[in-house]
Image: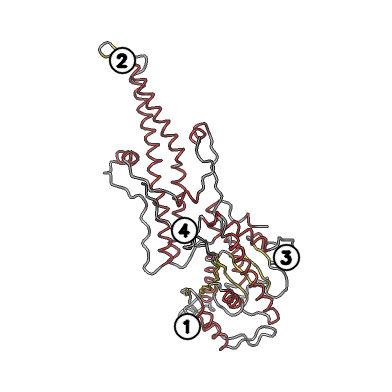
């Protein structure tokens, strides 16, 4: 009995990032807290509605009871203001909080000097500022500290390093979230890595933004891509826009369930013939997770033997998949992506020699048929012991043509070429994530969607 590949289904986790102002108006805090509560609850309820669907149940990891349990996570730098307001709301709702800091903790804590002296804003002393940070940090599930730095006597420059560090932590949040919540007044950034820059970066990266105005009591705005930032300086409600909640529902409905089954268009008589009796819309999810390991057979090494003969190399046994990048000890993220890379690469390695050898065999058989036809043409008499054997040559040529046709149909029917290419592209996508994981980085969800379906995030706009 054929053995299946060892591949775990992913957990259903939706990541919400937060960016926003540090100085919040005292009269707006309760409104902002309510808006954060509503968006987190809206995400959770939508995930719970999607979880029982068949396209979700078949794709994501299940509990022992056979159910998919969706999770919501908040990624926050825990700076004063919007970051912590979101962290408190997440904690109240039982949402896991992951913290990312631009510096080591001792260096980062130098920022927490309170917010006295700003009329109308929430007043926090330095001691309260630091105490709140440490309290929320103690509630975090995971903590990541980036290798940011500040300017020093050796590297003067108006604290440019610090600005780059704040920018890097904002980019980190964007790259690791599926939705960015921005508490923002719509104005330009006051420094490098400010809220406006992070919102623009998120829109360019294809990560949608849920914009909550920091100073005005207006409905939240959905920023699906950078085109939503055109016109007046980020006055997103200056023109008619769809309700943000509807856009969020569509985003989750498109992002979470497994893709619908599709079948490439069949062109030509041969493709039509090869598709007879085959399932019209195969399920890619079941196809991937139900993939059986392919036995190595002598015939599928034909392409490699021909290449070795033409290049004069001594034939060596080729691995079924490219070697994965060595996992870094203690780097759980990279080890995670390594396992996914190896699974996709092994699948690709199983189909590549099949489609290559099939066409090499076709060329070989076709060449043999031409040679036989040229040597033993009907114009020449082929007789042995007085018997005309021209019919035998014709029969042999017919067998060669039948073999060629059979290989073409088999290759088309089994989709060797398509599966080899798609699994290789998937493996290379995992390889990118694997490499970036060591740096604490990741491809933004918009980039992944663009590679996966070629549509980018255009379909998410209202």
Looking at the image, is mark 2 or mark 1 earlier in the sequence?
A: 1
**Residue corresponding to mark 1:** 106
Give percent across and percent down for residue 91. Answer: 57, 76
**Residue corresponding to mark 4:** 9
Local crowd size for mark 4, using a 10 Å CA cut-off: few (<14), some (14–19), many (≥20) = few
**Residue corresponding to mark 2:** 382
The residue lying at 59 percent from left, 78 percent from top is 88
Q: How many discs appear? A: 4
Label 1: element kind? helix
Looking at the image, is mark 4 or mark 2 earlier in the sequence?
A: 4
Residue 52, compared with residue 377, is above or below; it is below
Label 4: element kind? loop
**Residue corresponding to mark 3:** 237
* Between marks 4 and 3 in the image, the one whose residue lies nearer the viewer: 4
Instruction: Tell me whether the residue at label 4 lies in contact with that at label 3, contact meaning CB atoms closer than 8 angstroms.
Output: no
Q: In this view, does 195 lie to the left or right of 351?
A: right
């Amino acid at each position: 009995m054929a053995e299946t590949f060892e591949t775990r289904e992913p957990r259903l986790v939706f990541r919400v990032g937060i960016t926003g102002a540090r100085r919040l108006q005292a009269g707006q805090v309760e409104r902002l807290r309510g808006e954060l509560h509503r968006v987190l609850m809206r995400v959770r309820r939508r995930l719970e509605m999607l979880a029982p669907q068949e396209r979700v149940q078949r794709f994501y990891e299940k509990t022992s009871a056979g159910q998919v349990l969706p999770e919501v996570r908040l990624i926050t730098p825990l700076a004063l203001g919007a970051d912590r307001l979101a962290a408190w709301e997440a904690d109240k709702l039982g949402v896991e909080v992951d913290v990312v800091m631009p510096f080591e903790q001792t260096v980062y804590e130098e920022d927490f000097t309170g917010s006295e002296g700003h009329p109308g804003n929430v007043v926090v002393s330095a001691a309260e500022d630091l105490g709140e940070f440490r309290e929320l940090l103690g509630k975090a599930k995971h903590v990541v500290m980036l290798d940011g730095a500040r300017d020093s006597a050796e590297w003067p420059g108006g604290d440019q390093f610090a600005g780059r560090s704040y920018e890097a932590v904002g980019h980190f949040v964007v790259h690791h979230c599926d939705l960015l919540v921005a508490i923002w007044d719509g104005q330009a950034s006051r420094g490098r890595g400010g809220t406006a820059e992070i919102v623009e970066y998120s829109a360019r990266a294809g990560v949608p933004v849920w914009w909550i105005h920091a100073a005005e009591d207006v409905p939240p705005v959905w920023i699906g891509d950078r085109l939503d930032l055109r016109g007046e300086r980020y006055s997103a409600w200056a023109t008619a826009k769809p309700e943000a909640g509807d856009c969020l529902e569509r985003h989750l409905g498109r992002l979470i369930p497994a893709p619908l089954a599709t079948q490439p268009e069949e062109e030509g008589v041969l493709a039509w013939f090869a598709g007879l009796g085959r399932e019209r819309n195969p399920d890619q999810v079941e196809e991937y997770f139900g993939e059986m390991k392919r036995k190595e057979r002598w015939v599928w090494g034909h392409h490699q033997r021909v290449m070795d003969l033409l290049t004069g190399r001594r034939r060596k046994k080729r691995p079924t998949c490219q070697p994965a990048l060595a996992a870094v000890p203690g780097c759980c993220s990279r080890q995670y992506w390594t396992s996914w890379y190896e699974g996709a690469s092994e699948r690709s390695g199983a189909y590549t020699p099949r489609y290559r050898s099939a066409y090499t065999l076709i060329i070989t058989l076709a060449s043999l048929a031409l040679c036989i036809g040229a040597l033993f043409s009907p114009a020449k008499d082929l007789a042995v012991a007085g018997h005309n054997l021209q019919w035998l040559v014709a029969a042999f040529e017919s067998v060669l043509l039948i073999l060629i046709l059979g290989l073409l149909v088999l290759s088309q029917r089994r989709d060797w070429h398509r599966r080899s290419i798609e699994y290789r592209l998937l493996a290379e996508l995992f390889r990118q994530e694997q490499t970036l994981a060591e740096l604490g980085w990741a491809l933004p969800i918009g980039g992944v969607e663009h590679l996966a379906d070629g549509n980018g995030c255009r379909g998410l706009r209202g």
